[in-house]
Amino acid sequence: MSPVFPTVREVLALDPVRHGAPRLVAGDAGLDAPVRWVHVAEVPDIATLLGGGELVLTTGIGLPADDAGLRAFIGDLADVGVSGLVVELGRRYVSGVPRVMAAAAERRGLPLVELRRATPFVRITEAVHALIVDAQLTELRATEEIHQRFTELSVEGAGPAEVVRQAAELAGCPVVLENLSRQVLAYDPAGESAELLLDGWEQHSRRIRPAGRTAYDSDSGWLVTTVGARGQDWGRLLLRWPGGGDLAAGTTLGGRPAGTPPTRLTILVERAASTLALGRLIRRDAEGLERQIHRTLLTALLDHSRPVDEVALRARALGVTLERRHLVGVVVRHRLDDPAAEGGATGESTVAAESAPEAGPARLRDLAEAVGQALREAKLTGLTSAVDDQAVGALLALPDPAAEERALTAFAAALRRIRLDAAPARPALAGAVPPDAVIVAAGSGVGGLREARRSLIEARQIADAARRDRRDLAIFRLPHVGLAGLLHLLRDEPRVQTFVERELGALLAHDARHPRDQLLGTLRAYLEQGRNKSAAAAAAHLSRPAFYERLARIARILDVDLDSVEACLSLHVALLALDAIRTP
């Protein structure tokens, strides 16, 4: 049944019609035709006054007396598209309608019904019209709810997943949002099996080819609309409505073929698509939708916010297979969080940085795009997105463990090449770390998605620990960060923090009281130069007498012998631990 108009079959089941003892004489193939209105007529040329979809009621007193006239009357009604003809017996026809009329109606598939008992037509028209008006009012209220719901979603800046969920809830049908490559960006199965919905999605989607920007593909049962704005389409929104498969072909409903989705669903998908397009325009500085989904899935793995099976399913729908793969977590980050703040820029660039608060997010976005491009150039598959305000993460999906080193080397080389091509020329400073230098860190490879979190966390910890490592390694692994990496892993351990306070607390308190006479840097230079006082003085840009005097004060403050190998080793470990604690 149409959600607005009842069918001939349903009209015959109404009490006022049943009171007339109806009997179907011909045209049972058209019983599911919708009834747009009920019209009472007693003239033979009534067809010229009709628009299609009417159920015509008559006593037959004005119908032609000859067979040719009756055939023409039935033919005219069928041509204009009426839903059916109901004839009350007793006035013109006593025992039944003429056989020629029944035969003509059967040939045209037009339902012809006899009422064998006198029935006030007004009761039939009232019942049918009340049914139609009530259904139209229900449809109007549903349409209003659609507009209100999606207006609220637009104002709230709802993400694609929420928009799709609301569309599926309102429609009661599965809804899928895909990009132009037929990769699933969001979906809601509306209580059905997600596995069955998404299985072989790309191939299935490419067979759905509706005509027009918003159209229904009756062969597949999907209502489709294009998503985009300002002449730039970026996806399709699909709603599965298989309700038209069994309806009679060729009938019409107010100008709309029977078997197509109701107007309400067309309005729904178009409003949902508009909300998605508007949201993308509003978030023009945010990541692309694909990258947002990647971030959602990586975050889910890191914080256990979604079941692993769901992450695998959504990743597969996005074109990334994670099951039965060798997985390696990779984190890429800049060595310096803020080059200007950490001495890598001139005063002029510092002013520029302060006047451009968006520089940080833009820098991270550029790095994320470079990582994604490097994956494509290295012909690798995986999830990749920013994992925090400073780092970009990637989960590589490799065919087997033997491919790990080769894949990481290809990725690092591609990333370096992309960044070199994109970077403006700068004069190199001897011994200085470029302000845009990056660290590529990889965790240990794992054999399943349930262990992927460990690899990602390890990669993040290695990247953080390697920030002070001045070696220009293509890829940092756990053995490369050594003691600094171990201390970084233990930085939240209270016993490590207690050790730092015990070894360096007095010196840190001195520096806090004397901001113009900092001594921690002097101790760092001395220890990093292997207790070579001359080399340490040069590194600290101090004369040797001044440097020696500062060392003597440090020894008094800490009550320690700075010529003792064991004491200096303990202080050096404490300094590394302090760096790990202070590194965000």
Image: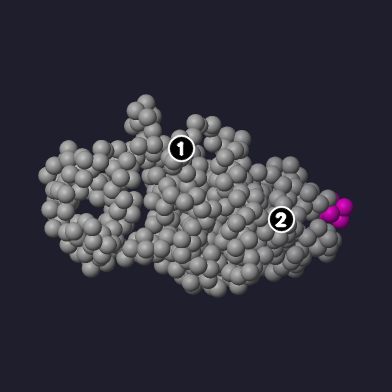
Tag 1 residue: 430
At which x and y percent is residue 51? 69, 44
Range shown magenta: 66-71
Task: Tell me, yes or no, if residue 166 can be seen here.
Answer: no
In terms of depth relative to the viewer, which is nearer, 357 or 561?
A: 561
The N terminus is located in which quarter?
bottom right
Residue at the location (68% across, 46% down)? 255
- Amino acid found under the numbered disc labelled 1: Ala
Residue mark closest to the camera, 2 vs 1: 1
Other residues around mark 2 within 10 Å, as few (<14) / some (14–19) / many (≥20): few
Q: Residue pushed farthest top? A: 348
Mark number for residue 392?
none
Splitting the image into 4 quarters, where does residue 98 fall?
Answer: bottom right
Return the residue nearer the eye: 302 or 205.
302
Nearer the observer, 356 or 213: 356
Q: Is residue 70 magenta?
A: yes
